[in-house]
Amino acid sequence: MHLRSGNQANQVNLAIVATDQTIARAARASDKPAKPYEVRAKTPVGLLLRVQPSGYRAYYVELGRARRVRIGPAGTLTLKQAEERAKAILLDPDHALRDKRAAFWVLEDYLDQRYAPHACAKLKNGERAVTRVKSAWKPLLKRRIDQITSAVVDRIRDTRVNSGISAATVNRDVAALSGVLTHWKESSNVKAHPLSGLKQLRVSDDEKIRYLSTEESARLRAALRDRDDLARSKRESANAWRVERGYPLYEAVGKYSDHITPLVLLSLNTGMRRGELFSLCWESLDLVRRTISVIASNSKGNTTRHLPMNDEVLDVLQNIRPPHPEGLVFKSPSTGKRLNNVASAWDSVTASAQIKGFRWHDMRHDFASRLVMAGVSLFTVQKLLGHSNSRMTQRYAHLAPSALVEAVMTLQRR
């Protein structure tokens, strides 16, 4: 048998050739040598088997001096499979070397060095996606990407669901991780996606549709008016004090004391998502034709939709319209940039209105529910909400019992 130790191999210029039968026999053996050795195949030239002192055996293909690509363990691959892979690698060595480098990426390093710059530049919520992967998949951050499999992810996913995290949240976490692995796959020319075959967890669509009763709606609007009136009264009192002392006056409070009431009224009357309202620009509003354009880049569904303004929405926008309207409609009073949070003000308003269990997003449900109860078709509601399919809109179907009754009554015997 023609053998050489790993250290000696680097010092010997003459290639040591073994027959295919010899390399096959070495692959089947179970010896544990004192030093690692290699056995070379006659064909294809470059294929070799390396045996470690532990007894571990792996096939490699040599592309040149100090250029090798690992094919795989002898216990998993047959000699025939190793030969076929070696031939493919020898035909396209640059591709093989890219794959080799790709295999050694650790998830955390790939996130920071490769994926984050791409996501932040190209994806609408890229920074949030990176943060989500780091938070949800901590056990995988130090793992090589080529070692991340559907089975590994499935085990971690089960652990998270059993800890009380909702299936819907875990599905979104998997989607974020899958986006990173797709980028790795495409940039590394890897054929198979690491999570191919992993199915989404089943999510029961049992979310309660929360909408305002007539009394709650009246209390909410009253709380908003009281909030604005109080701010206006305080401003008038402060200015009266400043007049007496000859100080410059503060700007008078108009119909609305800040952005909260306009945001709430627009949400109730358009069903726009909070992020869509925060990103709304004056250039997307046509007060003459009474339309709001929710552009694709600010929409969850990545499609532009056009919403009509009713009288209340038009009145709100006319009251807050500046002399030279441009840019964001609602700006942070502290930074002048896009709003990112109204939770504190919203909690205060709902507490004053004595409304419990009503989230900001529920105003979107309220908008849809009132339309359905008024007899508007689910198809129209779907278009107004910007749902990509009817499944999400079907949750409001039970609010139109008269329509369902009419449908069943058509089957009466004549």
Image (cartoon, grey):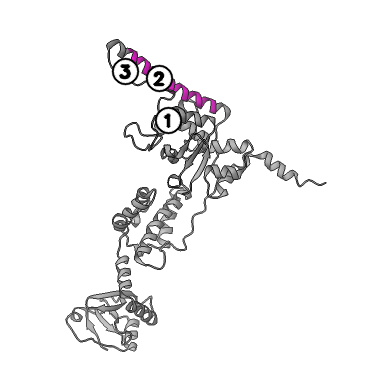
Front residue of this view, candidates 94 and 163: 94
> Amino acid under label 2?
Arg
Mark 1 and mark 2 lie on one chain; the one further toward the N terminus is 2
> Eyeballing the image, is 189 above or below 299?
below
Front residue of this view, candidates 272 and 206: 272
Which contiguous range is marked in magenta? 216-240
Numbered label attached to residue 321: 1
Q: Position of residue 75 (x, y in %)?
A: 36, 76
> Eyeballing the image, is 397 above or below 192?
above
Residue at mark 2 to residue at mark 3: CA–CA distance: 14 Å
Q: Residue at x 43, y 54 (%)?
A: 175
Residue carrying label 3: 249
- Is residue 210 visible to the viewer in this orientation of the structure? no
Looking at the rendered image, the disc whose residue lies closer to the viewer, 1 or 3, is 1
Asked if residue 221 lies left or right of residue 374, the reply is left
Residue carrying label 2: 232
Q: Is residue 382 magenta?
A: no
Residue at mark 1 to residue at mark 3: CA–CA distance: 22 Å
Element type at mark 2: helix
